[in-house]
Structure formats: C-alpha cells, structure tokens
Amino acid sequence: MLNKLFGWGKKKEVPKAGPEIPFGRYSDNNKPLAKVNRWTDADNLYKEKKYPESIDAFFEYLRDDTIQNVVYERNGAEGRFELYQGSKIVRGTISKEGVTAEVTLAKMPQASVPVMRRLLEMNFNLYYSRFALDNDRLCMRFDSGIDAASPSKLYYGLKELAIKADKQDDLLVQDFSMLQTADNEHIIISPQQEKEIKYEYLQKWIQQVLDTAASVDAEKFSGGIAYMLLALIYRIDYLITPEGKLLHDLEKITGIYFKKDERPVTEKNRDMLEEFKKLKERPKEEIFTYLFHSKYTFSIVAPQPHKAVSDSIHVANQNMVWYRDNNYPFIASQIAEYGISYCQYSYSLPKVITELFHLYMKINYADFFTALGYTNIPYDAARNKFDSEEIIDSVREIQSKWRDKYPNMDFKTQNLRFDTLVNFDMTYTNEIEFLNMDT
C-alpha cells in the first residue's frame, strides 16, 4: 500500500528511443577530469623513473570506459595490451626492456614487388612506426625502450600505428589482388535491415543533390552547388558511417574541392558530381562491405577552439540568406548544415556540441531516423510540424548534463524559430555559434 501511495515501488524503465547505432567519427577529447588527471600522473611517474606505474596510468587515461576500447594487464614488469581502432587491433607487450606493439594488415601468400614498393614509399611518411613483413603477414610495428617510453611518445606512436593501419588494411587489399584480409574478426557487421536503409538513403541523398545541381545554372549557383556537395559528404560520413575504401573515396572527393589550385569552383563541382555519379553506380553488395560497427581509441582529427566552429557556422549562415530569400530552401538548408557538419567532420568536437549536432540531424533527416527504428523524432517533415517542446527539452537536457564542465554555456532556446525548417536550421546553428565553451 505504501509503495503505491508514495511511489516507492520499482520505477518503470523508460523504453529505448531506438537501436544502438553509432554515428559519426570517434572523438577522444571528451575525457572526464579523472582521466585527464591520470595523464598528469603518468607524466610525473615517468619523470620519477617509475616506468611500470607510469604505463599503468597512461593506459588508464587511454581507455574509454563507455566502449571498453583498451585491454590492459600487468604482472610486475611484464604486461600486455590491446587497442581497438576500427577494423584493426593493436597488440603489444611491456617488459623491463621496453614497449612493443604491432598490428596485422593483411596476408601475402606470395611475395609481391608492387606491394613492397608501396609500403617502402609509405614508410617515409611515418615518424614512430614502420611497415614490416613476418613470413606471409604484412604488419606495422612500434617499439620504444622503457626509459624512453614517455606518455607523449606512447600516445603519438600508438596513435600513428593504429590510425595508419586502420586506413591502409582495406586499401591494400582493394589495390592488390594477391593480398588477403586478416585479423578483422572482431568487427560487428551491421544488421541487414540497417544496411538496406543506409544504402537506400545513400542513393536518395546523392540523387537529390545531383537533380538539384542539374536544375540550376552551374556558374551562377557554383557556390550553392559546392556547399551541397560538401554537406552531402559530411552527412554520409556522420549518418551512414562508412568504413574502408568508401570512407577513403569520400575523403578524395573532399580533396577535389579543398586542393589548393587555380581551378574555378565550377570545374571542381563538375569533378565532384562525376565522382558521386560513380559512387551511386556501385553495387549494393560492395557498399554493404563498408558498413560495420567498430570501436576506436584515437580520433583521426584534432580538437580546435570553439572560435573555429563559430566562424564556420557564421560564414555559412551569411551565405545561405540569399538562397532562403530567393526561394531555394533546399540549398539554403544544405548551406546551414555545412556550417556545423564541416566541424563535425574536420574537428574532434566536445561531446556536448556533437550531441547538439545529432539532435539537429535527427530533425533534418527525421525520415532516415524513423526508418532505422527511432521513435523520438521531434519533427514531421510531411506536415512541416515541429514538436517544439520536445526540442527545447532535449536542448536543456544536453545543457544540464554538461553544465559542470561548461558552466557559462547558454543555448537560448527562446531564439529558435519553428515556422520553417530553413529558419529553424539558421536559428539553431546560430545558438551553437554563440555558445560560451569556456571550461
């Protein structure tokens, strides 16, 4: 009776709002204070020549407890570790002499001069690690004497090893038919339905941009077309989260635009459009091979001050006004999306900004999230109807969660407009632009 009267009974569990699907690139600059302090401990212990204890603190700093991306064991002076980075696992040992680590790239049953030449050339761009051949196993290795294994050297050495290996394994197997995949049994293949939906929307989004670009003057609208193409890349990167060669190809399309040359934007747009047409024609089965879930230890991009985020949003929102006012709402929304999605793609953002960005994407691509099985979508695109209360509550919840770290962050929800998607996008990103991100 008392349980019923005062609500002392077991509380109802809030149902999940959707499947647990990872989105976007991993960011490692969101470590809590306790983790950051372990880096300081590692540095101090290293200076005191307490090397095993320093390494303990280092790996504790490195481990993301939410995803368990690091396995570490030590018994006296001896120890072992594993780091997960996408499709690869870095395996290492610790001894009185030093720290060694290696990662398997692929199997090479027969020696190949072209493969060895490729690896030899890439060796020149490595600072801490190197490519190696162990019988028929292509691998990368890193090692350090124990007295030189400072936290900084371990961090940058293992980061180079992990990121390069994760990127090169798929590319090598794709480029050289004699190579075979190896040591990737740990990856989690995406469910079939998820792959089908992601492929469907990949096709849909590409076609939408191709059709819009074809419907306007290529010269007059060169800026708007460029914004659409780049926003499309960043959307695919965040929502589809491709791996392997598909991710590499998207990076190549980005490079067409940002390459420092004298070519006019119209030519760059033409080349990017051609690459997207080729991407659209790829077999579904091939695209499926690049859709899987994996853990990460290192971010492939670096943190930036919030001013870089603010500047990107500000410039994009200034440039979208003409398109909004001249009845090109789709292009206008794409430009607003570019301002924040460029940052999500190019920088290791604070988690609070990524969470605000994720809410933005849920609103702008409500049909995609609904198809994946998410239920808490605060926007009905068919009726252009916003659930303004849900959106405001979500923003406040995100702010509240991060209030201790960012006490002066104030997202003014009263400034949001809910009359059209374009105006919502502009006012929402404006608020992100002016956030005070001092810690």
Image (tube, helix red, strand yellow):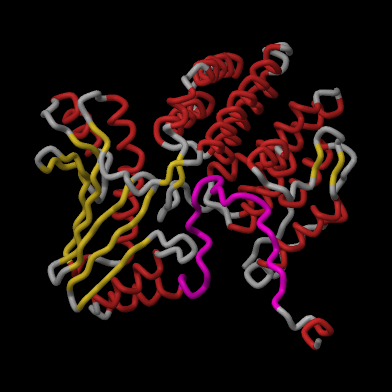
Residue 29, magenta (yes or no): yes
Residue drawn at point x = 46 percent, y = 71 percent: 35
Image coordinates of residue 175 in percent, x first then y, are 29, 25
The span shown in magenta is 10-36
Image coordinates of residue 332 in percent, x first then y, are 76, 30
273 or 106: nearer the eye? 106
Above or below — where is 369 with respect to 13? above
198 or 105: nearer the eye? 198
Residue drawn at point x = 70 percent, y = 24 percent: 224
Question: Left of 327 or right of it: where is 346?
Answer: left
Image coordinates of residue 33 in percent, x first then y, are 52, 73
Image coordinates of residue 385 in percent, x first then y, are 87, 40
Which of the 4 image quadrants contains residue 130? top left
Above or below — where is 290 with respect to 23? above
Residue 428, magenta (yes or no): no
Q: How many marks?
A: 0
Which of the 4 image quadrants contains residue 390? bottom right
Locate the N terminus by quadrant. bottom right
Question: Left of 286 or right of it: where is 386?
Answer: right
Q: Residue furthest right?
A: 419
Which of the 4 image quadrants contains residue 343? top right
Residue drawn at point x = 33 percent, y = 34 percent: 170
Locate the C terminus by quadrant. bottom right
Question: Left of 58 or right of it: where is 21?
Answer: right
Which secondary structure type mostly characterizes the magenta part of the structure? Answer: loop
281 or 226: nearer the eye? 281
Q: Residue furthest front?
A: 1
